Amino acid sequence: MDLPSLAIILQAALSPNPDERKAAEQSLNQFQYAPQHLVRLLRIIVDGNCDMAVRQVASIHFKNFVAKNWSPHEPDEQSKISQGDKDMVRDNILVFVAQLPPLLRAQLGECLKTIIHADYPEQWPSLLHWVKHNLQDQQVYGALFVLRILSRKYEFKSDEERTPVYLIVEETFPHLLNIFNGLVQIVNPSLEVADLIKLICKIFWSSIYLEIPKQLFDPNVFNAWMILFLNVLERPVSLEGQPGDPELRKSWGWWKVKKWTVHILNRLYTRFGDLKLQNPENRAFAQMFQKSYAGKILECHLNLLNVIRVGGYLPDRVTNLILQYLSNSISKQSMYQLLQPRLDILLFEIVFPLMCFNDNDQKLWDEDPHEYVRKGYDIIEDLYSPRTASMDFVSELVRKRGKENLHKFIHFIVEIFKRYDEASMEYKPYRQKDGALLAIGALCDKLKQVEPYKSELERMLVQHVFPEFSSPVGHLRAKAAWVAGQYAHINFSDQNNFRKALHSVVSGLRDPELPVRVDSVFALRSFVEACKDLNEIRPILPQLLDEFFKLMNEVENEDLVFTLETIVDKFGEEMAPYALGLCQNLAAAFWRCMNTAEADDEADDPGALAAVGCLRAISTILESVNRLPHLFGHIEPTLLPIMRRMLTTDGQEVFEEVLEIVSYMTFFSPTISMDMWSLWPLMMEALADWAIDFFPNILVPLDNYISRGTAHFLACKEPDYQQSLWNMISSIMADKNLEDNDIEPAPKLIEVVFQNCKGQVDHWVEPYLRITVERLRRTEKPYLKCLLMQVIADALYYNATLTLSILQKLGVATEIFNLWFQMLQQVKKSGVRANFKREHDKKICCLGLTSLLVLPADQLPGEALGRVFRAALDLLVAYKDQVAEAAKEEEAEDDDMDGFQSDDEDDDGDASDKEMGVEAEDGDEADSLKLQKLAAQARALRPNDEDDDDTDDDYSDDEELQSPIDEVDPFVFFVDTIKAMQASDPLRFQNLTQALDFHYQALANGVAQHAEQRRAEIEKENMEKASAVAAS
């Protein structure tokens, strides 16, 4: 297709007529893979005579096509773009990128990013040469624009992946320094100069983000850069040309330059300017930075902050970054000395006013309370907020330098409280009181520990916080609720004060102002956690839940759901009457959150977070009523639509949470309904398509379906669940691209089938054994080896004659048994078993080996019989020891917890070491003794296996997963099997026992005695259960 024809089709793609638009889209799709198509699109984008709207459509198509097709997605896939076209695009895109208007440049910038990430340096070695050449030529902007994209590719790369950065820095930084130097010397620079400096800053930032390139370790080179950064930092920003609109103003070029400069200096200081760094090269750099620059930067930062004090403008992000630098300086003695002379002005005239409620807050509160709430609870906003940075600064100051600052600061706050109390209604400093309350809340951890404040907290709350619950000013009512929540856990000497605060917070849920309602919900969570007598809340629970759901209809906020979870946790089964209503409301809230998240299309959207919270809360409710199975049938219709939709690709963000709900519904419902069975195929599709990372989560509901719906699993042919399970397991076990870790749930599922369907799946034994043996041969990880070997043990327990004949038919019987015995005998240097570490593993192996003992001599010769018998005895003894050890540990843990409880109380009673005087420079060391105790306990519980490369993280305990063999005692099973063998073939039994040495005869006697003891214990347990059932 020639250029004019392509331009006409692109023009048609803009048509107001939907049919014309659709036809144009179809034509574009039809020709997109034609040779030269990409090159023609690029020519239209750069053609200044072409209509701007057409160029824009071309740029969007170009960007989307490059993103999708520049590099193949699969290793063996053919590239959809010819090499010639790629070369042409690479050569031309660089020439034009700088000449285009910003809108088109942004689209081509995205394409460049895709191409550079895919091709540099291997397929595009000339790129760096082009950049270097143009940095010395007239094309400086284009070269900087491209270099920014190139350097960003390596921003977060470390080790070998970072290697190309060294050449980039070597080739370009000397030229960047020259350009930067020239730009800084321009008198009355234009906004274009700001754009160039900003690009240089961003390139520098990406190049030093993870480590400092070695060229910058040269003090002369580094100094040359620092002189320029300090020049930019100190230079006042001209008022001329600054936009009036606050949103545009903070994004104005020269403020952006200031922000990036502060950003770079903070990064150098916090990541590389720390003398505690281990690497000697970095330590030398840190000493140089600390000595020559850190103090100078501090001085510049303090001067910049002074602008706020005299009523000038500083963007929020710049203020935030400067305060972060100052916070990091507090613990460093030399820096703190520089800070001290100006500390009072900084603290009382800059930092504290930033903590106070201001005009912008009031405007947002009045005009958009929802946005006010969102900003207050958004952690991303905290990165930009001067208020959060101010709170952090004050907290750090009293934590690290409390001795000289805490009393002074609290005195200042108390003075504000006094002035507020003494002033008449119209002259009360409401905003300062708000800042003072924020400070008291932010310092709660310190004030709860340190005398004389610790014993005055209750009086302070009653005198200065609780009265604001009825303040005429909304933001003070909200702040009172928040502060009360921060202190809900203190020991109130007068329970009426706790009660009063709780009821005030509950009343806040009905406040006319939305932010007060949200802060009250947030505070309520602390009060519910701290509440010792639930009768305080029980009578108002129905109204409380009502207010909750009204609020959930209004705002999407994760913290709302957290509070609800806390209430459900506290009241447990008492929530039964509300369970259905709660689930219905949470389901409705979930759909609302999903709709807004889809509309916003942002991953960190609060709607998406709140949606996850809703599902977690539903799980908490299901868990709290798990002993009331009849409720699950009523709740199911509400949750089914969520489970159905979210088990598809639509639910990738919430997949784990949905699977948890499916697990509860399939485990606690009296029976698994047909509707719940309809979810099985969805999980199988997800697993085959994209959800392999969630295989351990999917294992749980699949286990429930097979173990609790065994009859339906076996009988149903439409769909055929047995076949569907086989298709999934066999494809995953055969997939050579999957790591050992990825497939661990597969053998566990085969185990579920063999154990739950005993005698009913004979036709599946051979296929499952075949894929198990195949996978076992290429397995490296010991844990997966054990799991696969346990499939063999399960098959033997299922049907020993059938299993042995299949292993012989496959010609692998000797190989498998040799490997099994070898794994059973393998020990580490410390003497502990290397394999089959869990109780469950040992038990399965015992049952499998024991099942072999009844086979006749023609199937299991005498020599093999003796070997199996001895291995089973060894395992039984190891199993018995492990069970006894676990019981002992559990007992010790209970005792320890009692001990720890009393330790805590002692600590509270004697806070002398936490009082103001005794404070290490790094603070927070008062708990170290308790931590040492905990660490010692943890070490005692850890196996002594330094020589083990295969960490025990793999051995996540599935002991809590129920299984039919839970009811089988391996000792009783072993003894009964031996008795059966003695009865059916006395001579074989006699030969076996006579061949045993003294050690194994003793073991056999011990096991026989233990089996009788277990038989008596089991009988007693069964009688107790029976009488308990009869009584209920």
Image (cartoon, helix red, strand yellow):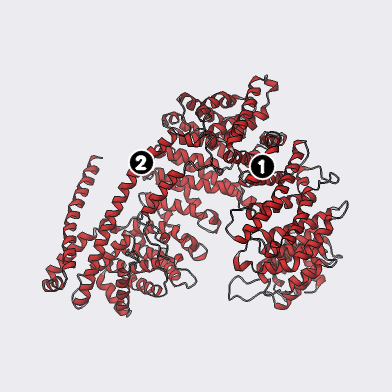
Q: In this view, does 672 lie above or below 930?
A: below
Position of the N terminus, as image quadrant, is bottom right
Describe the element under mark 1 as helix, strand or loop. Answer: helix
| Type of amino acid at the residue the image marks with label 2 | Gly
The part of the image, by quadrant, that contains residue 772 is: bottom left
Q: In this view, does 175 lie to the left or right of 163?
A: right
Q: Is residue 99 left or right of residue 665?
A: right
Separation (CA) of disc 2 from disc 1: 44 Å
Q: Is residue 680 visible?
A: no
| Type of amino acid at the residue the image marks with label 1 | Gln
Q: Which residue lies under the disc numbered 2?
A: 899
Q: Is residue 901 left or right of residue 1024?
A: right
Position of the C terminus, as image quadrant, is top left
> Mark 2 near mark 1, Cβ–Cβ under 8 Å?
no
Q: Which residue lies under the disc numbered 1?
A: 337
Q: What is the tally of numbered marks visible in this picture?
A: 2
> Which callout, 2 or 1, points at the residue further toward the start of the chain?
1
Residue 198 or residue 661, whichever sits in front: 198
The part of the image, by quadrant, that contains residue 208 is: bottom right
Could you tell me residue 463's position as x and y percent? 56, 23
Q: Name the residue rendered at 40%, 39% in the picture.
A: 572
Could you tell me residue 738's position as x and y percent? 48, 69
Q: Residues within 10 Å of mark 2 (few under 14, many from 20)?
A: few
Could you tell me residue 614's position as x and y percent? 51, 45
Residue 502 or residue 370, whichever sits in front: 502
The dot on residue 862 is none
Residue 128 or residue 44, whichever sits in front: 128
